[in-house]
């Protein structure tokens, strides 16, 4: 596979994941807003903004303006529409490596969302658009799964999706668990419920732990559950698996460098204990996992994408 | 007469670059009175050299260098023998003009008669030809060309740093100053406007005495014009002399663009600094290499181009498809 | 997921629609042809008496049973399909990038077997002569020595690549992919308007149009015996393969300027259809005269490059130094015979407007045959007799500068003012070599669905010729149509659309 194609597939998946994450968080946030006091809603918006953009401004958050910024502001690098546009740009560059169905689905989704304005959705049910977008993206995932050969390209998509997911999930969890340490403005019962919904985790969680909402259980589930697709552990497993499948013909030394990092990441997650983490260690743990993913990204690029040509002759 | 030539080109980059690709036109030609006795070329970092002969009969060496480097040095050494050169007549008969006909002219000549990148007619050149009374050739072709060479020599000061490798002749025409490359291009454009096939010669000059205006430590350039009864005859408008045994020819072309001593590209974002050193000695004299490499202006060699800014890149992609 | 609108049209298994009823709709009177104007130009569908020509009878019968709303619906479905597939080109203005489709017309253009036979033979003859010409001017220059073509025309051409002199190319085939533009004159004969020998594009539209139009009129398509074109990518692949000196494991790549190029869709389309790599210049590198692509597993050697970038940009070491699209060292790898490039470099010298005028002479010179397809009559102003004729008839002719394209340096005599003509006459006398003149060409008209109904619009025809170890022409073409009423400009950049072209078995 061409290095440039691998690069584009990887980023296409990252941007789709980012778009999906934004759509999901916005849908849940807008749906749950009505059930909160203005103060709680404001604190919750602040966490959403920080998780999605990294901004920590305490100012009151206007739902309309914030939604517009997070969803439709093309000047905003992380906006839903920007992520989709970038995903599509990357897909367009590798059309020959995608199935027609994947390209058309993504293209159509973009063309559908591209003209949408806040005014057109706000009056009625603003959450609905994001729900629909989310459904479309789930469908896109399905289309990708069932129309694309599960070869090297597919595994670069997997890498992009899950490396991005670890980072997005990491930030979301970090914001919530850090706030829980503060006490005063910390998440309430309802906020933990919303957090589970941000991660599509409400039902799977209750199946596992019943409806008793406890931060420690939530952390255990979202960090270490091996079966739930939005847990950190699940994504790490996918990353490890994918790393073993890409660049089959690369020189052994180079493959070893990548796989060593994958092994270290997996060990960190496999032997992590939620008991050790609850006394404030969640943030440190997440930071470590995120750092390791970044390192994997760098090594992946250095080994398979931007390597010096003289090293492989 | 034997000459030993050494020509060192050195590029220094402000940041590491990679994937350098370069073509070299430095090997003296072996034809007529000039015979190439030996030629060696090496690069540092070392690279595998390849060679071919271009359609003008010039030997071209080329190589690529994948790994990162901050410096690239090309070292060429040649030994050339210049044999007996038969003397030229003082003048030719006036019928010579009529001999520029389809019977005598061949493929090689036609290509040296039209406009080329650097040697082309322009309002500035036409104005110069008017002032210097060079609009129409005077006398037989040989006499006219000698007069043209003299005219350029008299009208221009030799001064380096006024023009660059890629300067159009208008620059030198405006300043009335320039270097050998400019003078050669001007002479070529005028001679071609008279209907005389004329070509650019890059090479080396053995400097003797103070009369030569060109620099001893650089490559040289002059022209050759085709005369039906004499063949290709050299003219050096920089020094107002007819090249004889002191001129060593390396490459011929329509103009400089066909025969730069080096032409290359690299990948990476870096500025490059070019140093050139040239020595030419009768081979009896030993060549000293120690002290002659110094930073010079990129006069006789184009600096390699580095990768494009993103915007230009996109712009070029938008090129038209038929 | 929404179904394509016409996946289930009633055309499937519909009635035998070729049984024509007695009362045909008449052009200019009955819907859907109420606004159809039959003029002086040859009309593809209607004979001068207003009756549909035989090959169009089935289509006519089908059209007269469909309401305008239904036609409109199908037309929109076609366009929607193009948009979704991303068969778009991007127009840049004011820093805004807008994606547009090249409109596809619903109604196919029909070419009979007999007409096609002549086109096929004529284009085969033409590409042979053009390749012999290219080989000649890049080797002995016999045609120049014999005075058939003036030397200055070749040496003065900006597309003449001196670097190609003396370089052998496989099978002597310089032009491997050619798209020639034909038009039908008032007498109904196809003549050649120009040859595109550098990077002709549009073949993906030929294939994409077939895909949507066949779905719009499935029954008509089935009954008419339309020759298939879907094997074009296979033929292209075979042509490219035939350029490699060996025949196993030939590694082929399409070299594209990138996603911002207007024809990028086509580059990706062909790469997918052929199953070859689509590469950009930055994916390639040359080491020791061998071309490689960078893959995740290391460097992979490339043997044949179908390049879709201009000569100038192919190799910054040899051609334009500021090219960021090409590959430094590529030409030397080519010279060394380690990679084949299609089309060869320097083919553009044979498709400029002046050389075009010589093609009939080239056919006679190289093949000792008469041209099967005529040129549009062309006067070379460099020839004294022609110049006189042109100057005397400026009000009737179109005069074009040889080196220009895209309508620059052009005089359209019948539409020009007296002053403009006089001004042009001066230019002509000053530099006659630089000009050619042609009579104004009346392109034929074909039925085209434009909103309110079926109207006559001018069309041309671009078949695609493949030439490697043998010559192949897939029986189909891109029909370009000028969507503006009365317009003769079929270029997509200026409001042109395209049509599916049905070449019949009979």
Image (spheres, coloured by chain):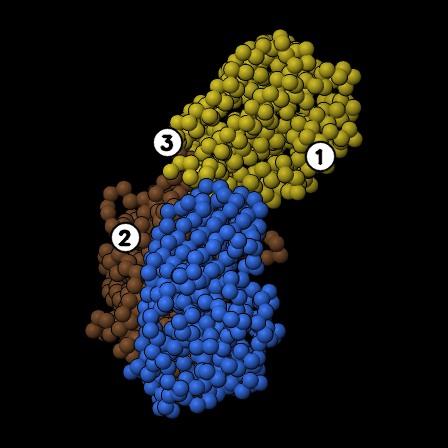
Between C222 and C144, the residue placed more toward the observer is C144
The residue tagged 1 is A66
Disc 3 or disc 1, which is closer to the eye? 3
Between C469 and C244, the residue placed more toward the observer is C244
Residues tagged by mark 2 and mark 3 found on one chain of the structure: no
Gap in angstroms between the C-alphas marked 3 and 1: 47 Å
| Chain B pictured colour | blue
Q: Which chain is brown?
A: C
Between B176 and C316, the residue placed more toward the observer is B176
Could you tell me if residue A242 is visible in this image?
A: no
Q: Is residue A25 above or below residue C114?
A: above
| Chain A pictured colour | yellow
Gap in angstroms between the C-alphas marked 2 and 3: 28 Å
Could you tell me if residue A192 is visible in this image?
A: yes
At a point 43% along the width and 57% down the height, the residue shown is B286
Q: In what quadrant of the picture does the C terminus of chain C appear?
A: bottom left
Gap in angstroms between the C-alphas marked 1 and 2: 59 Å
Marks 2/3 in contact by CB < 8 Å: the verdict is: no
Left or right of residue B241, residue C135 in this image: left
The residue tagged 2 is C243
Residues tagged by mark 1 and mark 2 found on one chain of the structure: no
Labelled disc at residue A249: 3
Image location (x, y in percent) of residue A196: 62, 19
Question: Which of the chains bears the disc numbered 1?
Answer: A
Disc 1 or disc 2, which is closer to the eye? 2
Image location (x, y in percent) of residue A154: 43, 31
């Amino acid at each position: 596979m061409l290095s440039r194609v691998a690069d584009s597939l990887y980023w296409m998946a990252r941007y789709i994941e980012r778009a999906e994450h934004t759509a999901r968080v916005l849908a849940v946030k807008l749906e749950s807003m009505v059930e909160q006091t203005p103060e709680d809603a404001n604190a919750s918006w602040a966490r959403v903004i920080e998780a999605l953009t990294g901004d920590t401004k305490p100012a009151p958050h206007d739902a309309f303006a914030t939604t517009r910024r997070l969803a439709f502001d093309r000047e905003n690098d992380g906006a839903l529409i920007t992520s989709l546009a970038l995903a599509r740009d990357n897909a367009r560059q590798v059309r020959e490596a995608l199935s027609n169905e994947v390209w058309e689905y993504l293209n159509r989704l973009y063309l559908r969302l591209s003209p949408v304005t806040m005014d057109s959705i706000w009056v009625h049910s603003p959450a609905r658009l994001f729900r629909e977008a989310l459904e479309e993206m789930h469908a896109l995932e399905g289309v990708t799964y069932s129309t694309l050969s599960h070869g090297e390209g597919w595994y670069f998509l997997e890498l992009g999706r899950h490396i991005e997911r670890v980072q997005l999930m990491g930030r979301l969890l970090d914001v919530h668990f850090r706030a829980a340490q503060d006490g005063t403005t910390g998440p309430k019962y309802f906020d933990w419920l919303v957090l589970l919904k941000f991660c599509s985790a409400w039902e799977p969680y209750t199946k596992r732990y019943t409806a008793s909402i406890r931060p420690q259980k939530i952390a255990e589930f979202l960090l270490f559950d091996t079966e739930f697709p939005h847990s950190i552990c699940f994504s790490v497993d996918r990353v490890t698996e994918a790393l073993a499948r890409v660049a089959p013909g690369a020189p052994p030394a180079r493959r070893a460098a990548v796989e060593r990092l994958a092994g270290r990441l997996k060990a960190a997650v496999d032997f992590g204990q939620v008991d050790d983490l609850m006394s404030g260690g969640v943030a440190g743990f997440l930071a470590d996992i995120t750092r390791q993913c970044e390192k994997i990204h760098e090594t992946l690029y250095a080994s398979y994408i931007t390597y010096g040509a003289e090293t492989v002759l | 007469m034997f000459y030993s030539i050494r020509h060192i080109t050195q590029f220094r980059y402000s940041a590491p670059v990679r994937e350098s690709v370069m073509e070299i036109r430095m090997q003296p030609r072996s034809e007529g009175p000039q015979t190439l006795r030996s030629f060696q070329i090496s690069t540092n970092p070392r690279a595998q050299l390849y060679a071919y002969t271009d359609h003008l009969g010039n030997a071209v060496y080329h190589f690529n260098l994948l790994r990162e480097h901050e410096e690239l040095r090309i070292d060429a050494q040649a030994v050339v023998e210049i044999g007996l050169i038969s003397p030229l007549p003082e003048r030719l008969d006036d019928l010579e003009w009529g001999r520029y006909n389809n019977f005598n002219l061949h493929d090689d000549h036609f290509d040296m008669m039209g406009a080329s990148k650097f040697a082309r007619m322009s309002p500035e050149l036409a104005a110069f030809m008017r002032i210097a009374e060079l609009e129409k050739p005077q006398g037989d072709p040989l006499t006219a060309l000698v007069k043209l060479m003299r005219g350029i020599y008299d009208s221009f000061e030799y001064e380096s740093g006024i023009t660059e490798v890629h300067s159009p002749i208008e620059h030198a025409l405006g300043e009335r100053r320039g270097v050998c490359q400019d003078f050669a291009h001007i002479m070529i454009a005028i001679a071609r406007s008279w209907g005389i096939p004329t070509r650019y010669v890059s090479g080396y000059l053995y400097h003797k005495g103070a009369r030569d205006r060109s620099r001893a430590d650089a490559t040289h350039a002059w022209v050759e014009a085709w005369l039906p009864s004499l063949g290709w005859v050299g003219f050096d408008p920089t020094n107002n002399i007819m090249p004889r045994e002191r001129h060593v020819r390396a490459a011929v072309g329509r103009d400089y663009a066909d025969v730069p001593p080096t032409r290359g590209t690299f990948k990476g974002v870096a500025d490059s600094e070019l140093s050139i050193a040239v020595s030419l000695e009768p081979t009896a004299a030993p060549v000293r290499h120690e002290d002659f490499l110094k930073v010079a202006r990129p006069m006789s060699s184009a600096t390699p181009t580095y990768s494009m800014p993103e915007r230009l890149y996109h712009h070029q992609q938008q090129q038209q498809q038929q | 997921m929404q179904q394509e609108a016409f996946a289930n049209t009633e055309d499937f298994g519909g009635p035998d629609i070729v049984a024509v009823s007695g009362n045909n709709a008449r052009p200019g009177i009955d819907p859907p042809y109420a606004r159809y104007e039959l003029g002086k130009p040859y009309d593809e569908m209607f004979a001068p008496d207003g009756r549909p020509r035989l090959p169009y009878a089935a289509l006519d019968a089908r059209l007269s049973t469909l309401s305008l709303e239904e036609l409109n619906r199908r037309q929109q479905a076609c366009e929607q399909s193009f948009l979704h597939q991303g068969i778009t080109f991007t127009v840049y203005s004011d820093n805004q990038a807008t994606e547009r489709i090249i409109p596809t017309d619903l109604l196919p253009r029909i070419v009979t077997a007999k007409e096609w036979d002549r086109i096929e033979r004529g284009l085969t003859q033409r590409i042979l002569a053009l390749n012999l010409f290219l080989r000649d001017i890049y080797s002995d220059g016999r045609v120049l020595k014999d005075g058939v073509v003036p030397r200055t025309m070749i040496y003065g051409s900006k597309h003449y690549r001196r670097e190609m002199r003396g370089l052998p190319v496989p099978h002597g085939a310089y032009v491997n992919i050619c798209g020639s533009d034909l038009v039908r004159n008032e007498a109904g004969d196809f003549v050649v308007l120009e040859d595109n020998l550098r990077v002709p594009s549009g073949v993906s539209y030929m294939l994409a149009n077939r895909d949507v139009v066949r779905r719009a009129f499935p029954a008509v398509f089935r009954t008419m015996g339309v020759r298939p074109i879907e094997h074009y990518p296979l033929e292209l692949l075979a042509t490219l393969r035939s350029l490699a000196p060996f025949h196993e494991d030939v590694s082929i790549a399409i070299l594209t300027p990138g996603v911002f190029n207007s024809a990028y869709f086509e580059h990706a389309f062909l790469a997918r259809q052929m199953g070859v790599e689509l590469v950009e210049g930055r994916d390639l590198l040359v080491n020791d005269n061998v071309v490689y692509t960078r893959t995740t597993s290391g460097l992979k050697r490339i043997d044949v490059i179908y390049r879709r970038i201009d000569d100038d940009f192919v190799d910054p070491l040899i051609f334009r130094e500021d090219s960021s699209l090409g590959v430094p060292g590529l030409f030397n790898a080519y010279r060394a015979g380690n990679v084949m490039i299609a089309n060869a470099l320097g083919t553009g010298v044979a498709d400029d407007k002046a050389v075009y005028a010589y093609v009939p002479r080239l056919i006679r010179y190289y093949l000792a045959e008469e041209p099967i397809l005529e040129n549009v009559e062309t006067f070379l102003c460099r020839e004294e007799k022609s110049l006189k004729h042109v100057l005397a008839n400026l009000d009737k002719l179109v005069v074009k500068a040889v080196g220009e394209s895209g309508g620059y340096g052009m005089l359209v005599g019948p539409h020009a003012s007296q002053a403009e003509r006089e001004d042009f006459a001066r230019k002509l006398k000053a530099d006659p070599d630089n000009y050619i003149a042609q009579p104004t060409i009346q392109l034929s008209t074909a039925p085209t669905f434009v909103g309110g109904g079926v109207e006559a619009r001018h069309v041309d025809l671009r078949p695609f010729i493949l030439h490697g170890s043998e010559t192949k022409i897939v029986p189909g073409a891109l029909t370009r149509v000028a969507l503006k009423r009365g317009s003769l400009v079929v270029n997509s950049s200026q409001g042109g659309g395209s049509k599916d072209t049905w070449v019949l078995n009979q």
